Image: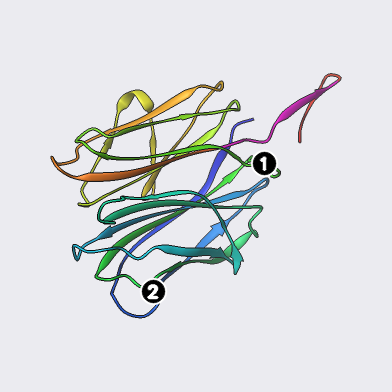
Amino acid sequence: MSTILDATTGVSDTLLGAGVPTVSFVHTCTGVQLLLVVQVLLTSTGGVQLGFVTGVTYNSVPLVRANSLYDVNNNRCGAEVWYLVNPLIGAHNVVVNYSTPNASNRTVVNSSSYNGVDQITPLDASSVVEQVTTTPSLNVTTGVANALITSTISRTVFSAITPATVNALTEVGAAYNIVVGPPAVFTASWSGLAVGVKSTHVLVSFAPVASRFIGVNEVDV
């Protein structure tokens, strides 16, 4: 069984260097065997260190961080992926909490809900990379068939980027995803970055509901 996109919501905001900033917006979940994925991009528009994501909630329920990466030298860009199994159906607030940034930071947040995701062990695999190249790329090795892969890529200069045709990533709000077939090494690659721009990239693979055969009937477990 493959996962199916339920809904997506995206916002962008500027976090100023004061107080404890948050970003909040409404996301509506419908369907069965649900998973909510929240992808966060951060870029320091002030040229100094970023604030960090300290937590994400949906309907006041904490999400789990799947993986994250901030550039190690000057902390100018960061990407994070968070998820929640079986989110409450209906319209509820997604709230992203940040540590206090040292200067103005731009953040882009994308929430996507999916039907047909494994409710016991949803996280399959993940990988991260920091690069300075006009064509960044990253591999992740999936361990299940029909895995849902989400790609979250931040950069020190926000600009339009294009996924390579060969990996067929689909834009979902401010992020990208794809459902792949048999377990394999999947490569997400991009073009369009300017020379000298640094990127931080997070790939996460989520497992679909597994199918089992009982006699002549197929059931989802």
Residue tagged 2: 21
Q: Nearer the viewer, residue 97 or 30?
A: 97
Badge 1 amino acid: Thr
Residue tagged 1: 121
Q: Is 63 above or below relative to 203?
A: below
State the image coordinates of residue 185 (x, y, percent, origin top left).
47, 23
State the residue at coordinates (43%, 62%).
Answer: 53
State the residue at coordinates (21%, 36%).
Answer: 133
Q: Nearer the viewer, residue 114 or 77?
A: 77
Left-right relation of 101 to 31: left
State the image coordinates of residue 203 (x, y, percent, origin top left).
44, 39
**Residue lying farthest to the right in this orientation:** 215
Secondary structure of the residue carrying numbered label 1: loop
Badge 2 amino acid: Pro
Q: Say few, some or many: other residues with alpha carbon within 10 Å of mark 2 (under 14 / 14 to 19 / 20 or more).
A: some
Q: Nearer the viewer, residue 12 or 205?
A: 205
Kindly indicate whether the residue at mark 1 contacts the one at mark 2 (C-beta within 8 angstroms): no
- Residue 161 appears in which quarter of the rendering? top left
**Residue lying farthest to the bottom in this orientation:** 19
- Residue 9 appears in which quarter of the rendering? bottom left
Spatial CA distance of label 2 from label 1 is 32 Å
Q: Is 68 above or below relative to 144?
A: below
* Mark 2 vs 1, N-terminal side: 2
Q: Nearer the viewer, residue 138 or 108?
A: 138
State the image coordinates of residue 22 (x, y, percent, origin top left).
42, 72
Secondary structure of the residue carrying numbered label 2: loop
Query: Which quadrant holds the C terminus?
Result: top right
For the magenta stretch, what is the residue range?
206-214
Q: Is 65 above or below relative to 142?
A: below
